[in-house]
Amino acid sequence: MTTERQIIFHGHYFQDFYLDVSDNVREKIGYVFRVIKTVDKVSEKFLKHIEGTDGLYEIRVDVGSNIYRIFCCFDKGNLVVLFNAFQKKTQKTPKHEIELAEKLKKEYFTLKDKQNEKERSNKKRQKL
């Protein structure tokens, strides 16, 4: 079975990161995104759940000896929502990066819930 996931970003963090990296890093990010979009069971080499979190994942991009991480989550299974990203310089992922990703994830779902509630309210008014 071929999976077709959609990748979106929440906030400006990923976009800021992406514009700041070199062309070869962008190419590798593009390759990893294509894998995530089309492969049913993505290897942990590219996508790994972050232990101790509720549904937060890291997209793993290695270019030469440089390591990059992009935090994300799934929404409705086939929608990947990107949050913050950074170049990893130590063995352990910095706690403040995980905390920022968790905050952005919560913000994303809060905004989505408000938008869905507004749409339901508008539909009820249209029926009246």
Image: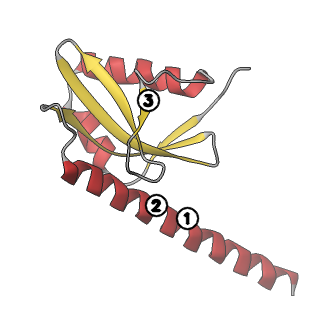
Mark 3, secondary structure of its residue:
strand
State which quarter of the image contains the N terminus.
top right
Q: Looking at this view, is 34 or 91 the one in front? A: 91
Residue 47 is tagged as 3
- Residue 103 placed where, x, y %? 34, 61
Q: Residue, x 64% and y 76% (percent of image)?
A: 118
In the rendered image, the vertical position of residue 92 relative to residue 65, given as above or below: below
Q: Residue, x 19% and y 33% (percent of image)?
A: 87
Left of 4 or right of it: where is 92?
Answer: left
In the rendered image, the vertical position of residue 23 relative to residue 127, given as above or below: above
Say which amino acid is labelled 3.
Answer: Leu
The CA span between labels 1 and 3 is 24 Å
Left of 112 or right of it: where is 89?
Answer: left
Q: Quickly name the residue at label 1.
A: 112
Residue 108 is tagged as 2
- Residue 90 placed where, x, y %? 13, 32
Q: Earlier in the sequence, mark 1 or mark 3?
A: 3
Say which amino acid is labelled 1.
Answer: Lys
- Residue 91 placed where, x, y %? 17, 31
Q: Residues within 10 Å of mark 2 (few under 14, many from 20)?
A: some
Mark 1, secondary structure of its residue:
helix
Q: Residues within 10 Å of mark 3 (few under 14, many from 20)?
A: many
Whether the residues at callouts 2 and 1 have beta carbons within 8 Å, the answer is yes
